[in-house]
Amino acid sequence: MQRAVCLAGGHEAPAPGCACGIHAAASLERLRDESLCLRPTEALVVGEVSLWGAVVVDDHGLRAQYAVPRRLSLVVAGSDDEAAVAAALAQLGAYRVPVGAVAPEEAVGDVAAAILAHQAMSR
């Protein structure tokens, strides 16, 4: 379980008018539409979370006081490095929730998958 804190405002999180809180998209489709998964990272994980406590709904999704993962998927693009994928899946297993692997196109859509592939080649 994670509890949100506001480091900038010193108030309880989440608060209207502030960006604090644990962020979540309302759906995978919304995540794709907002291109929220196009952050260059070493690993991309998508999942489903349970949110509770104070929850603020805004234009980009939800921000909550508390959250816990319910299901996680490692986004894997036909990786030749099976050991790295296995290690990443094992790390996700520490959350004690169902863990799997998913293709980039399924997780983030075709266009976003192409952009992520380009970002990976640029590193």
Image: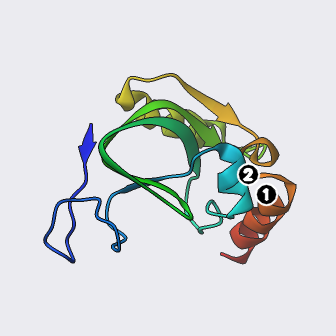
Q: Quadrant of residue 53?
A: top left
- Indicate the position of residue 44 as horizontal and vertical percent values: 58, 52
The alpha-carbon separation of the residues under discs 1 and 2 comes to 6 Å
CB-based contact (under 8 Å), mark 1 and mark 2 = yes
Q: Quadrant of the C terminus?
A: bottom right
Q: Residue at x 65, y 54 (%)?
A: 31
Disc 2 designates what residue? 108
Q: Residue at x 78, y 61 (%)?
A: 112
Query: Which residue carries the number 1 mark?
Result: 113
Q: Residue at x 61, y 28 (%)?
A: 100
Asked whether 81 or 40 is in front, the reply is 40
102, above or below 11, in the image: above
Amino acid type of disc 2?
A: Val
The relative height of residue 91 versus residue 21 in the rendered view (above or below) is above
* Tag 1: amino acid: Ala
Snapshot quadrant of residue 47:
top right
Q: Residues within 10 Å of mark 1 (few under 14, many from 20)?
A: many
Left or right of 9? Residue 109 is right
Whether 47 is drawn above or below 21: the answer is above
Q: Position of residue 85 (x, y in %)?
A: 60, 39
Dot 2 falls on a residue whose secondary structure is helix
